[in-house]
Amino acid sequence: MPPDSLLVAALGDIHGRFHRVEAWLDALEEARGRRVDFVLAVGDVEAFRHADDHRRKAAKRAMPAEFAGYADGVTRVKRPLYFIGGNNEDFEALHDLPDGGELAPDVHYLGRAGLRTLGGLRVAYLSGIHAPRFIDQPLKRPTSLDTAKQAGYFRAPEVERVAALKDVDLLLVHEWPRGIVQKAREERLAPARPLPSPWIGNPVTRKLVDGLHPRWVLCGHSHKPFAVSLEAQGRTQSRVACLDQAARPDTAVFWLEFEGREAQRAGWGVTGTVAWEAGQRWGLHTLPPSGEPESGDGPGDDPPGATA
């Protein structure tokens, strides 16, 4: 493989299922015959340091408190993991790390908004979801249930920080850009599964995508896989990949192989099967066949005042 080749894996909402996704990444490496250079997670990671915090505050409380073992050094991830915040996180721990930090060996919170260069790729990110009532309000320390929920909403200065960026390879957001389902409907492409509501997502994230023209956009939150291309005349095409929660690997794992800063191929799941190659059209036809989710792995609750 070329010396500047990278295999980047992305994960949908982990919701504390660290052991599961580690096994999935092992399988992906075996299938592709190479190491995953680093992993990107699109929010709702729920990296609770203490088991008691997980049991009291996690959206998926029935799941074991797996991150505590990583935080205590009992076990560690096999590949560097970089994640943004969703609307279900350990916000008390993240509040003092607005520009990111390492929560456990090789587990990195990117921060609330900004840009990080990873493996030579320019990765922009915006944590949280859109709540119109709070976007212009100051961020408060999460010392109560209400202020913890509000910490999961992005604020106007954070959006502006991302909007000022240029030349972005990957944009990580938690909530979908508004209008991507309608775009797929207008293209009249035969979907691999039923289309979600056209009102899913938020207009703030969509405006960011339309202004930045990142080459790839990765998002989660809605626990559904989706793929669409957004184009502006004379500008870079943005390929959007929305990931499912970590219930099944075929829709919760997405991977990209780069040579330099150019993506050469991409795929869903851990079989190593290529769903897209450079020069091909990106869209719903790249999704894996539909299947039933695991029992008990439905979507978590969104905070009041947030958009869906």
Image (cartoon, rainbow, N blue to C red):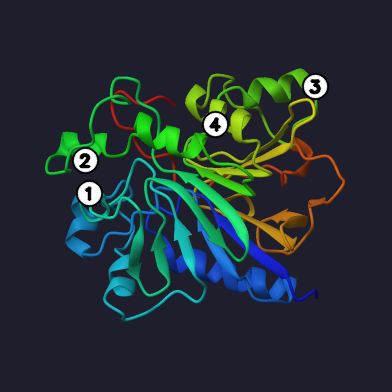
Residue 181, percent across and down?
Answer: 64, 25
**Residue type marked 4:** Leu
Query: Residue drawn at (64%, 76%), measured in percent from left and top?
Result: 35
Of badges 4 and 2, nearer the viewer stands 4
User: Which labelled disc corresponds to residue 57?
Assistant: 1
Q: CA distance from mark 4 to mark 1?
A: 31 Å
Q: Nearer the viewer, mark 2 or mark 3?
A: 2
Crowd tier of the residue under label 1, counting other residues whose Cα lies within 10 Å: few below 14, some 14–19, many 20 or above: some
Left or right of 185 on screen, residue 251: left
Q: In the rendered image, which residue does mark 3 sit on?
A: 188
- Position of 208 compared to 234: left or right? left
Q: Earlier in the sequence, mark 1 or mark 3?
A: 1
SS for callout 1: helix
Q: Find residue 208 and name its label.
A: 4
Mark 4 against mark 1, which lies toward the viewer?
4
Outermost residue on the bottom side: it is 74
Identify the mark nearer the N-term, 3 or 4: 3
Under circle 3, the secondary element is loop
> Disc 3 marks which amino acid?
Arg
Q: Residue at x 51, y 42 (%)?
A: 220
* Callout 1 touching callout 2 (CB < 8 Å): yes
Would you name the residue on which mark 2 appears? 148
